[in-house]
Image (cartoon, rainbow, N blue to C red):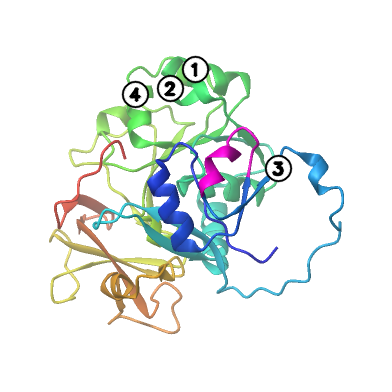
Amino acid sequence: AGGAYVPLDPDYPQERLAYMVEDTGLSVVLTQQKVAGILSDFNVTAVPLDNASQFANYPVSNPDVTLSPDNLAYVMYTSGSTGNPKGVMISHHNLINFAANCEQRYEITEADNVLQFSTMNFDIFVEEWLATLTQGATLVLRDEDVSLSREAFIAFCDSHAISVASLPTAFWHMLALSDAELETLALRLVIVGGEALDKQSVAALKPSFVLLNTYGPTETTVTASGYAISGGYDAPRAVPIGRANVNTATLVLSEQLTLCPPGVVGELYVSGQCLASGYLHQSELTAERFIDNPYFDPTNPALSARLYKTGDLVRIGADGEIEFVGRSDDQVKIRG
């Protein structure tokens, strides 16, 4: 239809929803009748999609819309240091590049049943539908109970023959306390992210099962890197966050923006076709976090003209894999 979407979680506080509606200038909200009342205080048109009769008089032809790769696809709000969330602007170009990464790394086929675990207000939801539908696989929408207990998750995956799932790392840790039941499932790939992965949770994975430990701020279109594990993990170091995604570069730089050699801790910067356009209506913050890339190479799509300053401290291991060390500020993640 030519527009960009903004996910609004009906469980959010009214103040947060009001800020997001005002900040984006939303005029239309696609919703359901059971939650449409939440929007009554906002100057928007609520369109309940489960009320089919209201669409009877609309044309069935596609609108005549011309889009470019740089057009906005969605705005995803993340926590901001000022108290208000910040809207990260993701383009169609970013999405297509991420789809190419998913195709290469996840190897999803028409035979896969992929679990929808995330709520739509997190960008992992983008990963779930994009990686699935672009490959002709089946996206299985979960029940509310699936995210509440290990038993409900296993029962749901078993009954729907789930083969691929993307989970918060904390939820994976809960599942991995005992892997006896996991081995009976059809799961072949689990993608985790959001916090450091406990290596004990992947110490004895079966060889037919792959766990992909991913890293990526919202500003890098879902993920920026990943590290695949199969058949267990027994290295003395922490589980790496891996190597960069397709058309993406992960640079470990000093305060002077010089490249850090392997083993030396520096700040992680990301470049490439994954970088968001910036923050909606926050030009100063955009300029602060998205900086000129001193290693820009117009012949290399991974070395874009801009760098994203993640604020994360990392180092490159002897094998070239990136290891997460901590934050350069006092930011703390709570449950991912």
Residue 263 belongs to the span the image colors magenta? no
Write down the residue under mark 1.
Answer: 152
Q: Give the range drawn in magenta.
A: 31-41
Please identify the quarter of the rendering in which residue 64 is found.
bottom right
The residue depicted at 52 percent of the width and 59 percent of the height is 98
Write down the residue under mark 3.
Answer: 49
What quarter of the picture does the N terminus occupy?
bottom right
Task: Tell me how far mark 4 sits from mark 1, CA to CA.
Answer: 12 Å
| Front in this rendered view, residue 329 or 15 | 15
* Amino acid at pointer 3: Leu
Residue 70 seen: yes
Compare marks 4 and 1 and give the one earlier in the sequence. 1
Compare marks 4 and 2 and give the one earlier in the sequence. 2
- The answer to the question of whether label 2 and label 1 lie on touching residues, with beta carbons closer than 8 A, is yes
Compare marks 1 and 3 and give the one earlier in the sequence. 3
* Amino acid at pointer 4: Met
Write down the residue under mark 4.
Answer: 174
Q: Is residue 295 left or right of residue 111?
A: left
* Amino acid at pointer 2: Leu
Secondary structure of the residue carrying tag 4 is: helix
